[in-house]
Image: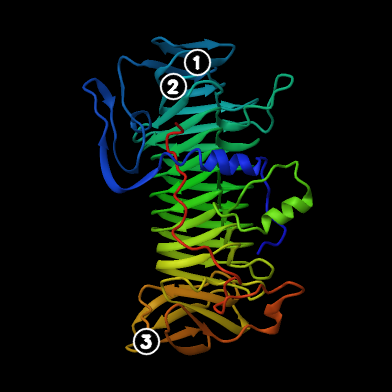
Amino acid sequence: MKKNKKKMCAWLITMVLGLAIVGCSNNKTTTTTERITQQTETTATNTSNTTTVGEYSDEDLNTSYSDSDTKIELSAGSANITGEGATFEDGNIKITKAGTYVLSGDFDGQIITEVGDEDVVHLVFNGVNITNTTSSAINAATGKKVVITLVDGTTNTLTDGTSYEYADGEDEPDATLFVKNNLTINGNGSLNIDSNYAAAIKSKDNLIILGGNITIDSVDKAIKGKDSVTIENANITINAEDDGITTDGVLVINSGNINIEKAGEGLEAVTIDINGGNIDIVAADDGLNARGLIDDSATDAEKEAYGEENQADTYLKITGGVVNVDAGADGIDSNGQVYIEGGTVYISGATSGPDVALDYNGDATIKGGTFVSTGVQEMSQTFSSNSTQNFITAYYSSTLEAGTEIKVTDKSGNIVVSYTAAKSFSFAIISSDKLTTGETYTVTTGDNSDEVTITAGGNTIGERTARGMGGQGGMAATDGNGGPGGNPPTGEPPQKPTDANGN
């Protein structure tokens, strides 16, 4: 149920579904078994113990460096280099071979890689402040992978200018921290990025963030990994004029704290898996957006039709963590499926149609966790009837103000669910694993108090108002519980097409 407003990205549908999804399905980013990885070397001067849930390469987890590694001591427009593989040329640092490079100090210039296609460059940020007013601060246009380690206790800063100077025919780099291929960020130090021209962090293959305290202010996108983005153990704060965290493939969040204080769309990908962490999103557009991709050469009519299709391999899946969304448009928007299987999810959607708190083209099921969303009745959708966890759909005859508490209590007065809406609303969806079939609950919302005896699946309070019907085509056919009409997909969700390492 799209409203002809979704962004369409420049990839062929067949390329995305055939290559980005099927091609990556041989590897999974996440597993259900936690393992502890300890990186130690007898000669290391810095190590970091990291608990991870996903499967990663030794390169991704390596935070070690030693006295034998090349040291680059920066000072304004110059550098003192001890070791091999790096040179100071034309005001920039050029890294010409694989290896570990320890950087410290302040620098006006750029860090550039000129290495082989299979080379891995390990940059250790040991208190650096890099500013480049004419281009990116880091330009890793070569190599298989760049691994950036943020040394514990250090603060590191990258800043670019408001315009970039390009050679004829070139349009890259186009991010403050730019990596042509794969990028991994690890360690427990801090990284501040002030992006004044385009994106803040961009990897044109896979992007993995396994730690650090990362603060981003960007005039464009904050974080983009073209093929995938995986996040664990990181504390990330974002203020962006465009999207917060985006990829043209797979987005997986396993743990950490992500605070998107300002963005166009909060999280955007073909598939989104949230398995843990604390995620707070304030978005001018959609909060969580799972969308397919279509080539920009398609006509407007083709794009419109594609945006209204059920894109079977597109989904949002939440199994754990705490997710808070305050969205100016759709709170959750999936061109395909929505699976809520755990965690705690609070959604405050738009205050006027046609945007809604929960929007999907295929199927939306809830199997576990706590879920509360608020929005408007126009074009509203709720969970599908094949959900295995009970839920309540509430329609209100008048608009309730921002700050109104939705509270569900059992017959003994115990609070089962409580949520204070961030914005005004006339429609809500409430679900909890504590809503027991056959039991009676009281739903209190402002001056409204309703009793409901739970039947298996969907339960309704109030009636959809005439204005909730919207204009022509304003209300989709329903399955009896407010979900979309027709036969929903059956079986298990598609396998997560994840590949943490980009192999």
Instruction: State the image coordinates of residue 384 (x, y, percent, origin top left).
Output: 52, 71
Q: Residues within 10 Å of mark 1 (few under 14, many from 20)?
A: many
Can you see residue 420?
Answer: yes
Image position of 172 with respect to 306: above or below: above
- Image quadrant containing the C terminus: top left
Can you see residue 195?
Answer: no
Badge 1 amino acid: Val
Q: Nearer the viewer, residue 415 or 241?
A: 415
Badge 2 amino acid: Val
Badge 3 amino acid: Gly
Image position of 498 with respect to 315: above or below: above
Q: Nearer the viewer, residue 156 or 472?
A: 472
Q: Which residue is mark 2?
A: 121
With 156 as the anchor, is 57 left or right in this view?
left
With 404 as the anchor, is 399 left or right in this view?
right
Q: Which residue is mark 3?
A: 438
The reply to whether callout 3 and callout 2 are in contact (CB within 8 Å) is: no
Cα–Cα span, label 3 and label 1 = 66 Å
Cα–Cα span, label 3 and label 2 = 61 Å
The reply to whether callout 2 and callout 1 are in contact (CB within 8 Å) is: yes
Q: Residues within 10 Å of mark 3 (few under 14, many from 20)?
A: few
Q: Which mark is residue 67?
A: none
Instruction: State the image coordinates of residue 337 (x, y, percent, origin top left).
Output: 53, 59
Which marked residue is nearer to the observer: mark 3 or mark 2?
3
Instruction: State the image coordinates of residue 59 (x, y, percent, origin top left).
Output: 37, 28
Q: Which mark is residue 115?
A: 1
Q: Nearer the viewer, residue 495 or 58?
A: 495
- Image quadrant containing the N terminus: bottom right
